Image (tube, rainbow, N blue to C red):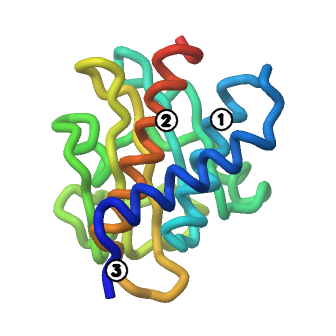
Amino acid sequence: MATSTSDAEARALRALSLALRDLPARRSPDVDLQLVADLAKDLTTARYAALAVTDRHDRTQGFFVAGLDLAVLRALKGPPQGHGPLGSLREDGRPVRYDNVESARKSFGFPPKHPHMQRLMGIALWVGMDVRGSIYVTDREDGAPFNDDDERMLLTLGQHASSVIQHRWF
């Protein structure tokens, strides 16, 4: 049975509140954004999550991941630049969901040593009228497709991330 909109949002807000409570009052924006990536992974039961911060010219300025070990992350030789299926987040700002990201119309291949990913869901991070990043999750642990509740979780977490980006990043 699917939860209501308010249940999904309440779960995300409760998890965010509990996590922030345990952090020191003076912390870097990186700590908050990593927390959002970690919660996105946990709350959607995704195998991987990532949060990218972009500048006004759409270049990745910050990249936070959950679920990838350090060796895999280093092998990627840099954060993704939002081309391919995630590029539409930056173009129109609407959430995306793919059941098979590798066969998506805009997919043109992953970089060498990139972990295999099948299902993907992502949202844009808005600062004012501009998209200034994205959060995305891949492959739920149970193998199920991402659903509306998962999207609401990301949107709720995205509001916090957008606030951090607006007030503490640039």
Q: Residue at x 70, y 48 (%)?
A: 19
- The residue labelled by disc 2 is 160
Q: Which residue is at 33% across, 29% downward?
A: 126
Q: Is residue 55 left or right of residue 30?
A: left
Residue kind at label 3, given as amino acid type = Pro
Q: How far across and down, in percent of the image, does residue 78 sit?
A: 61, 40
Mark 1 crowdedness (10 Å alpha carbons): few <14, some 14-19, many ≥20:
some
Amino acid type, mark 2: His
Count of marks placed on residues: 3
User: Which numbered disc flags the more N-terminal residue, 3 or 1?
Assistant: 1
3 or 2: tag closer to the N-terminus: 3
Q: Measure how far apart labels 1 and 2 are at the Cα level.
A: 9 Å
The kind of residue tagged 1 is Asp
The mark found on residue 135 in the picture is none
Contact between labelled residues 2 and 1, with CB atoms less than 8 Å apart: yes
Query: Outermost residue, top direction?
Result: 170
Which residue is located at x 50 percent, y 61 percent?
11
Q: Residues within 10 Å of mark 2 (few under 14, many from 20)?
A: some
Mark toward the viewer: 3 or 1: 1
Name the residue that disc number 1 marks.
Answer: 32
Q: Which residue is mark 3?
A: 145
Along the line of sight, the residue nearer the viewer: 11 or 67: 11
